[in-house]
Image: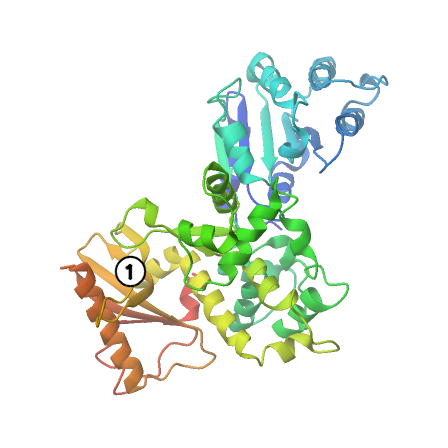
Amino acid sequence: MLIGREKEQETLRRALQSNQSELVAIIGRRRVGKTHLIGSVYADKIRFETSGVQNASLKEQLNNFQFQLKKAFGTLAPEKPLKTWQEAFFTLINCWEQDPSSYQNVLFFDELPWLATRKSGFLNALSFFWNTWAVKNKVVVVICGSAASWMIDKIVNDKGGLHNRITKRIDLYPFTLAETEAFLKERGVVLNRFQVLQIYMAMGGIPHYLNEVVPGKSAIQNIEDICFSNSGMLRKEFGRLYPALFENAENHIAVIRSLAEKRSGMSRLGILQATGLPDGGGMSTCLEELEASGFISAYPSFEKKKKDLVYRLTDEYSLFFLKFIEPMSFQGDDIWKHLSQTQAFKTWCGYAFENICLKHIPQIKKTLGISGIYTEASTFYQKGKGDEQGVQIDLLLDRNDNTINLFELKFHATPYVFTKKDADAFRTKKALFQHYTQTRKHIFLSFLSVYGILDNEHSIGLVDNSIVLDALFL
């Protein structure tokens, strides 16, 4: 059963029902479920499909293409080896025209970046195929790629033969918490939401990773098996992940490692200083590629210019790997149980929970009853000046109804009990924000934690909105 993806499914169905040819681009990171989405929605409508193979030679890619031709068209496919992509597409056209189908009209090209290697001629051949034949024959051509930035640069923003040819674009993102819960339940994994949150914090909403979670085991047991056992799928996934998506992946990994060390995020300048990488177009491309692929997120600073963006590592698995799997020194059974007693665990929980909250802004807005109000989510940081105290706010919602929600995000396994110190710190944060920004908007102090607040004399009258974990599952 296909979980979630309602809008994406509808887009694919509209393409199938269109009275003209459709060129559909599906963009999403590795393991996010692009192929499964196409296979589920189009099922028996696919007449021809092929997929690129990482690091394969042109000859190998063409041999694979020819094999797929034989699967689709039988004896109509020639035995003579294909030598160029142009010849490959000519052959596809000839086979199709000799054996047209009345109900199968989908062509699926998966992992396009691996097919379109340098000097291979694939993109030129695909362009010719679309512009001279496909566009006239009422077919649906679906192209997918895990290297999101490559797909955007080479396909969506192409200045050549594919310029403005994409008719429908689908950006496929990891599951939300609600979709993760539904996915696990469909597989017979029934856990309470705190347990689901723990799994999500370690591996994110990547279906391929979540598929490893087994029924009858707790979150800690599953994380132990998947991430720390010798046969665990995520034990060594990090080393394969980035090279599979990017050229010069060592630069991307350097950025990821630097962001993993900075909970509050880093500016572009801070990343340059931390990594030692040169400034220029190469760094811009690296950041754009990581952001387009969903590994990092760029958050604007309140009322500041674009150059003041703060970058955060928001890929749950990468953070978890760098914090726990890679430096693992403890050996034996119950590794994760041991690590979860450390101070590093508590620090990671706070960071991971903040990231998850930042990814679920629509759910937070729905809980606050402001879904219909235009809102800009941002961060705020002001370094102290002289005797003046600095302030950092990880999330604020600047609303178009002349109000601002200023959030405190806390990962706590029990209802949070405000102390006088907590209350004073929260009031101070609000006062400093008003002082530095000179905003005239009304400020609501909002608190988001797993189990909310245990009301007492310090919280009553201070916290305007208390939001619990369930809100993120809407």
Q: In the displayed structure, would residue 37 be above or below residue 404?
A: above
Q: Secondary structure at mark 1?
A: loop
Q: Residue at x 46, y 53 (%)?
A: 273
Nearest the camera: 71 or 173?
173
Nearest the camera: 177 or 357?
357
Q: Quadrant of residue 316?
A: bottom right
Q: Residue at x 64, y 41 (%)?
A: 35
Q: Is residue 15 visible?
A: no
Task: Classify residue 357 as left or right of residue 131.
Answer: left
**Residue 176 coordinates in the image, percent (x, y):** 49, 56
Q: Residue furthest left?
A: 440
Q: Residue at x 65, y 36 (%)?
A: 111
Counting every numbered tag in the picture gives 1
Task: Classify residue 371 as left or right of residue 411.
Answer: left
**Residue 259 coordinates in the image, percent (x, y):** 49, 58
Q: Is residue 59 visible?
A: yes
Instruction: Tell me how the rendering is colored.
Output: rainbow
Q: Quadrant of residue 306?
A: top left
Nearest the camera: 80 or 274?
274
Q: In the displayed structure, would residue 423 be above or below residue 236?
A: below
Q: Residue furthest right?
A: 79
**Residue 127 coordinates in the image, percent (x, y):** 58, 18
Q: In the displayed structure, would residue 55 be above or below residue 290?
A: above
Q: In the displayed structure, would residue 369 be above or below residue 36?
A: below
The quadrant of the picture occupied by the C terminus is bottom left
According to the picture, the residue beneath numbered tag 1 turns out to be: 369
Kind of residue indicated by mark 1: Gly
**Residue 372 coordinates in the image, percent (x, y):** 28, 51
Q: Quadrant of residue 342?
A: bottom right
Task: Classify residue 25 as left or right of residue 414.
Answer: right
Q: Residues within 10 Å of mark 1 (few under 14, many from 20)?
A: few
